[in-house]
Amino acid sequence: MANVESMIVEEKTQIKQIDREKTCPLLLRVFCSTGRHHSVSEYMYGNVPTNELQIYTWQDATLHELTSLVRDVNPDTRKKGTYFDFAIVFPNFRNNHFQMREIGVTCTGQKGIDDNKTLAQAKFSIGDFLDISITPPNRMPPARRQRPY
């Protein structure tokens, strides 16, 4: 019988540098809520949540950069220790529903492992929505986000 070997290959994605002077930005539709993500049902049938923030940005925008843009327009989120939990809301064409996928967490005043994650790395597609759950510093962030490392 032949020997069977397995090999783990770490796939590294090349991040394309975007020339922001020559590349047209995309419209990122962002929906923020305090303490929780919006329900996926709020995105059904052509509807979206009411508190929309429109940001023109590029696929190489980081979660830290997006956090700064949200803090600029929302003074309540500027306090140190505020958590931003990012999720992409995208259409599932197989069943005509929307799905939500969490992509990372940032915290005001602290460096985190998701700070440098880009929209492209999170597999954001033009036309998807960004849903941000904002947790103020006086509340505990979701327990699932406390990582052992």
Image (spheres, rainbow, N blue to C red):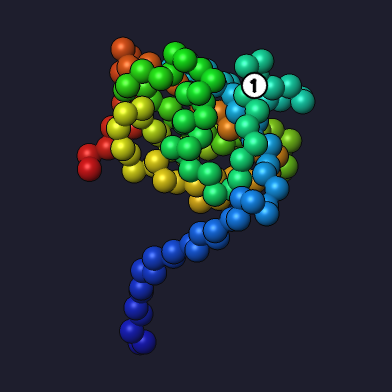
Q: Which quadrant holds the C terminus?
A: top left
> Closest to the observer: 36 or 23?
23
Q: Number of numbered discs present? A: 1
Q: Residue at x 68, y 54 (%)?
A: 22
Residue 102 x/y as whole percent? 48, 36
Looking at the picture, which amino acid does disc 1 mark? Glu
Looking at the image, which residue sits at the far left? Answer: 148
**Residue 18 image point, x, y percent:** 59, 55
Spot the residue most to the right.
Answer: 46
Q: Where 13 falls versus 138 (above or below)?
A: below
Across and down, in percent, residue 88 comes to 56, 36
Image: 39 above or below 18: above
The answer to whether residue 13 is visible is: yes
Q: Residue 19, position in %: x, y? A: 60, 55
Instruction: Report the residue at 31% width, 22% height from top.
Output: 81
Q: Quadrant of the N terminus?
A: bottom left
The image quadrant that residue 52 belongs to is: top right
| Residue at (64% x, 51% y) in the render | 21
- Residue 122 appears left or right of 3: right
Q: Secondary structure at mark 1?
A: strand
Any part of residue 37 in sight? no
Does residue 70 sit above or below 64 in this rendering? above
Residue matched to label 1: 52
Left or right of 55 on screen, residue 106: left
